Amino acid sequence: MRTIELEPGLVRLVDQRRLPLEFAVLECRDYRQVAEAIRTLAVRGAPAIGVAAAAGLALAARAAADRPAPEFWAALEAAARELKATRPTAVNLFWAVDRAMGVARERQAQGAVPAEVAEALYQHAVRLAEEDVAVNRRMAEIGQELIRDGDGVLTHCNTGSLATVDWGTALGVIRAAHERGKRIHLYIDETRPVLQGARLTAWEALRYGIPATLITDNMAGHFMRLGKIQICFVGADRIAANGDTANKIGTYTVAVLAREHGIPFYVVAPTSTVDLSIPSGDHIPIEERNPEEVTHIAGVRVAPEGIRVANPAFDVTPARYITGIITEKGIIYPPFEVGLRRALAGGDG
Ligand code: MRU
């Protein structure tokens, strides 16, 4: 199945908290369940949380569709606010909710009654999900050209089907190269503290038959020095106008190591991850998560009680460490500001 599936009044999500031990599907009939799923990482990955939020908004609209218009709109605005408050870093979430609200307001301006607005929001969420898959396929086609037969490829976090509706961004590129018959070897950073690499990317790599080795995050430099890694691909949660990129904590370390070893470092992200409203990565809000993600592993305490803990979920890789940004509009090379603006204006990178 796809990571996110929609039916009128129902959103199905692969519950990523339980993988790889169990494949379970979460059924959400209320937008609050979707908000909770985003907050608790049942659904995660920038593109996936954007689509989930749009689907959640469609649920909220359906639930309020019989109410008088002022009440309907108040309920919809409240749901939009609540969905946007779930996680702060991935701009896809805000992009998706704002875009959906734009569709709703447009239908209102055309004289639509609440039930018609609710239907438009559902149809919009379905389209957004389809669009996500198409965009990922396009990025995969473009990006796989960069991978040569025999390459060792490093990735961080999970950017596969699970992080999107289907196919994936950085992992989608790697999967496309594998499906083209290129003999690659994937090195997967485990991605502490939530272990998206160990739990999710490793699970996906096995499913697709991509030859892969799981390593802990602090092994990346070792394998680069040994010449095992020729190229790195990561995803993004928000790309500032100058190309600075927020992604899973530890991405910056990989980028600096790659530079030291002369290894190309690519970001793979749809244009919906680009935030031209902020000039640089200094303006990207970084989510701070529960300290227990650091003090505990799989529910078992590994650090002494009373120790102070920092748990930023993302870091910012300065644009100067990024070789190129692969979008559905093409590969953007430095200076990123020019290429990103052109790509968002509708042209090629
Ligand atoms: O905290 P997460 O698991 O939502 O973080 C996910 C990442 O950092 C991904 O690399 C990013 O969202 C891109 S997913 C295609």
Image (cartoon, rainbow, N blue to C red):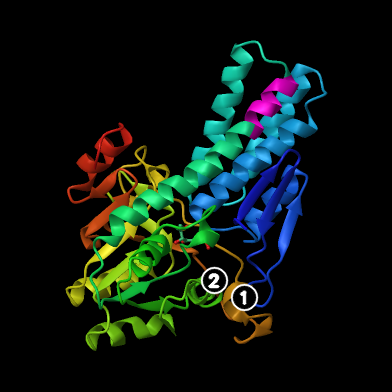
Query: Looking at this rendering, what residue extends furthest in the top direction?
Result: 111
Residue 20 image label = 1
- Quarter of the C terminus within the rendering: top left
* CA distance for labels 1 and 2: 7 Å
Residue 47, visible in the rendered structure: yes
Q: Give percent across and percent down for residue 95.
A: 49, 39
Q: Give percent across and percent down for residue 286.
A: 47, 56
The residue that label 2 is drawn on is: 200
Classify 310 as above or below 91: below
Residue at 23%, 70% (x, y): give it: 148
Q: Nearer the viewer, residue 70 or 37?
A: 37
Residue at 50%, 64% (x, y): give it: 313
Query: Looking at this rendering, what residue extends furthest in the front direction?
Result: 181
Classify mark 1 as within 8 Å of ligand 1 or not, answering yes or no.
no
The answer to whether residue 103 is left or right of residue 151 is right
Give the amino acid at mark 1. Answer: Pro
Give the amino acid at mark 2. Answer: Leu
Q: Give percent across and percent down for residue 40.
A: 66, 60
Classify mark 2 as within 8 Å of ligand 1 or not, answering yes or no.
no
Magenta segment's dominant SS is helix
Residue 315, visible in the rendered structure: no
Q: Give percent across and percent down for residue 315.
A: 40, 62
The answer to whether residue 263 is left or right of residue 44 is left
Element under label 1? Answer: loop
Element under label 2? Answer: helix
Magenta-tinted stretch: 114-122
- Neighbours of disc 1 within 10 Å: few (<14), some (14-19), many (20+): some
